[in-house]
Amino acid sequence: MRIIGGKFKGRVLKSGGKGRGKRSVRPTTGLVRGAIFNILGKEGVQGKRVLDLFAGTGALGLEALSRGAESVIFIESDRGALQLLEENISILEVKGLVEIRASEVFRGLSVVETKGENFNLIFADPPYA
């Protein structure tokens, strides 16, 4: 899996697969990510605070960072996916721009609400199961 646009364009990320955690980690495909970010345009991402629910490998949030997002909070509960997400953040060296919350998504949203956090862009790409 590769970042398809922005300053990290072409950088290869880990995508996992079967046997990592409770479920197979299936990142959002490059075709789908490309369509989403083409619709959003440069202004739709630049300087925005992003929340990536069911983050998996972090493909959507990391693509947003590559295209100029200010910061990303990832919420993910699967251990295998969390490991991949941490590895991908390390690959891109963006640790200071992200926060990982290891939590079931609806519990994580409750924390977001309690803290009064606001986001300009929210991705929700749940697993197929």
Image: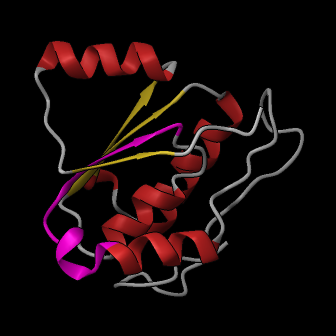
Viewer-side residue, 38 vs 102 = 38
Viewer-side residue, 118 vs 99 = 118
Which residue sits furthest right?
Answer: 19
Q: Estimate the x, y position of residue 18 in percent, counting from the top left.
A: 88, 44
Taking 7 as reference, is 126 above or below it? Answer: above
Q: Residue at x 71, y 59 (%)?
A: 15
In the picture, residue 125 is in which quadrant?
A: top right
Residue 17 in the figure: left or right of residue 57 = right
Q: Which residues are magenta?
A: 40-54
Taking 100 as reference, is 58 above or below it? Answer: below
Q: Estimate the x, y position of residue 32 in percent, counting from the top left.
A: 58, 70
* Colour scheme shown: secondary structure
Taking 22 as reference, is 126 above or below it? Answer: below
Residue 90 in the figure: left or right of residue 23 = left
Q: Residue at x 41, y 13 (%)?
A: 107
In the picture, residue 1 is in which quadrant?
A: bottom right
Q: Reply yes or no: does residue 51 show up in magenta.
A: yes
Q: Estimate the x, y position of residue 124 in percent, counting from the top left.
A: 47, 42
* Image mark count: 0
Q: Residue at x 71, y 36 (%)?
A: 80
Q: Reply yes or no: does residue 110 show up in magenta.
A: no
